[in-house]
């Protein structure tokens, strides 16, 4: 039978999948925190969403119901026998886009959870049974909301319910050259993933750095060595000839005559290598304009729009793989993403994550309107502090110092405790006013804290804040 997985193979694979999942869950190196003791079992007949035009090609199954309305409740998707380009339309706006997918084409892997080659009843029934654990895990999470949060939560849910990382792969047919197959059907997946990583819901793992066309943004670039003057790649490497007697140096082609080498400057015949002349090296010449250059320029020509970008001016874009973090699972179970406006109105103390969210949200506003923006960071002498209070008390001291700082902050300022210090965000504050604020706070800490705390303080203005936030992360 021409199938990818016949009934017996699928049942065996399901058992192996459950065993593999248990081993992953028990492994201490797993990136995904999974407190569930086992895959939950479905308590009702599975409902399969099928395209209305494709349902007539499927057999009736005694223990399965078919639905054709994408807004209806369903547990899994049976994709039509078409290419992967149909998947975005298939899942866009449907009630359960994270549902496991049974497909009839390898082009939908790995977004498809099972691929079969025929729609005979035994094959399809076995495929449905094999994805029921995933369907049960999806159903245990809150429904995905409509709106801007949907794409981010869907990415997290696919990662969580499949117990895998979101891996980047080469995709030469795309201008980006890289894609995320697990997120097939999500528009602009890289932006979605970067937003989730910035919110500490996913952890980045570096994949590749690609250059981008400065005209259209495509990464499908042809690297070229070109003439500095005319940008032609018609370059030739020629041998240099040096005439000892008159010290003239030129390309070998300039010396070549029918009778041998003749110096183009003094017209003398060059007879003996090492006596009359030598060849000290090579030079690059442009056959298009005739210019001579020591080194060619390296640049990129976009294969999509044809625009040329010099290598020194080419922008680059970093691509990553992404692992799910505990905060991402918490967001899934709450049914909503952390919102920037949750911390916009906060004053006083906050967690390091809330601090980064607040600063990352308010910094672009300060840049756009040319307003002052300062962050100051205090680093404690931890070794000296350990000698005075012991290692266990160091985190409590950091927290206490943060609470002292909060008493001296204005409305709209924010402070957070770090493992070995504190950081304070001062919007609408220039360097001079920030220095005065720091002096007052340092005096206040000295009066109210025992033991004596040794610390170093750094001030960062608006142009430096982005680098500081990256360091704090």
Image (cartoon, helix red, strand yellow):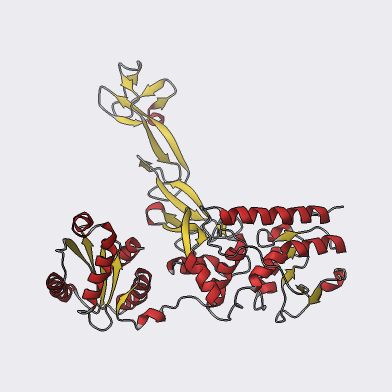
Question: Exactly how many numbered labels are in the figure?
Answer: 0
Q: Is residue 150 left or right of residue 339?
A: right
Quadrant containing the C terminus is: bottom left
Q: Nearer the viewer, residue 109 or 88?
A: 109
Q: Measuring from the top left, give residue 61's x and y in whole percent.
A: 86, 70
The image quadrant that residue 460 belongs to is bottom left
Q: Is residue 170 visible?
A: no
Q: Nearer the viewer, residue 235 or 63?
A: 63
Q: Measuring from the top left, give residue 98's x and y in whole percent.
A: 64, 70
Q: Is residue 263 left or right of residue 303?
A: left
Q: Nearer the viewer, residue 447 or 371?
A: 447
The image quadrant that residue 348 belongs to is bottom left
The image quadrant that residue 80 belongs to is bottom right
Q: Is residue 234 visible?
A: yes
Q: Nearer the viewer, residue 442 or 367?
A: 442
Q: Measuring from the top left, give residue 81's x and y in whole percent.
A: 78, 65
Q: Measuring from the top left, give residue 179's x and y in whole percent.
A: 57, 59
**Residue at figure coordinates x 25%, y 22% from the top left:** 245
199 versus 428 height, above or below? above
**Residue at figure coordinates x 22%, y 70% from the top left:** 401
């Amino acid at each position: 039978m021409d199938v990818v997985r016949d009934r017996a193979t699928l049942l065996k694979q399901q058992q192996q999948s459950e065993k593999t999942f248990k081993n992953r869950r028990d492994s201490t190196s797993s990136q995904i925190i999974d407190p569930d003791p086992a895959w939950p079992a479905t308590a009702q007949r599975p409902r399969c969403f099928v395209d209305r035009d494709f349902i007539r090609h499927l057999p009736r199954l005694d223990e399965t119901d078919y639905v054709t309305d994408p807004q209806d409740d369903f547990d899994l998707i049976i994709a039509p026998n078409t290419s992967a380009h149909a998947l975005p339309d298939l899942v866009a706006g449907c009630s359960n886009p994270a549902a496991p997918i049974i497909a009839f084409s390898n082009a939908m892997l790995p977004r498809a959870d099972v691929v079969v080659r025929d729609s005979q009843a035994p094959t399809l029934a076995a495929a449905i049974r094999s994805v029921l654990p995933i369907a049960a895990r999806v159903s245990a999470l809150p429904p995905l909301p409509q709106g801007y949060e949907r794409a981010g939560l869907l990415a997290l849910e696919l990662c969580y319910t499949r117990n895998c990382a979101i891996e980047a792969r080469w995709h030469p047919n795309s201008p980006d050259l890289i894609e995320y197959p697990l997120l097939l059907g999500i528009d602009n997946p890289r932006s979605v993933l970067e937003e989730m990583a910035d919110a500490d819901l996913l952890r980045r793992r570096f994949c590749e750095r690609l250059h981008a066309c400065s005209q259209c943004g495509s990464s499908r670039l042809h690297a070229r060595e070109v003439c500095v003057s005319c940008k032609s790649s018609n370059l030739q490497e020629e041998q240099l000839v040096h005439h000892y007697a008159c010290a003239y140096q030129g390309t070998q082609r300039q010396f070549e005559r029918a009778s041998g080498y003749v110096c183009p400057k003094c017209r003398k015949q060059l007879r003996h290598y090492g006596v009359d002349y030598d060849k000290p090296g090579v030079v690059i010449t442009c056959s298009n304009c005739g210019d001579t250059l020591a080194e060619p320029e390296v640049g990129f020509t976009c294969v999509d729009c044809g625009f040329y970008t010099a290598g020194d001016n080419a922008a680059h874009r970093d691509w990553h793989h992404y692992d799910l973090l505990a905060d991402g699972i918490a967001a899934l179970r709450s049914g909503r993403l952390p919102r920037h406006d949750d911390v916009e109105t906060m004053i006083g103390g906050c967690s390091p994550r809330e601090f980064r969210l607040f600063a990352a949200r308010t910094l672009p506003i300060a840049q756009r309107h040319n307003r002052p923006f300062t962050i100051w960071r205090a680093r404690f002498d931890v070794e000296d502090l350990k000698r005075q209070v012991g290692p266990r008390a160091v985190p409590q001291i950091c927290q206490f110092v943060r609470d002292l700082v909060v008493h001296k902050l204005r409305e709209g300022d924010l402070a957070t405790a770090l493992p070995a210090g504190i950081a304070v965000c001062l919007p609408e504050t220039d360097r001079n006013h920030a220095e005065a604020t720091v002096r007052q706070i340092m005096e206040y800490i000295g009066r109210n804290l025992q033991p004596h705390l040794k610390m170093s303080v750094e001030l960062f203005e608006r142009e430096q804040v982005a680098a500081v936030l990256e360091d704090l992360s």
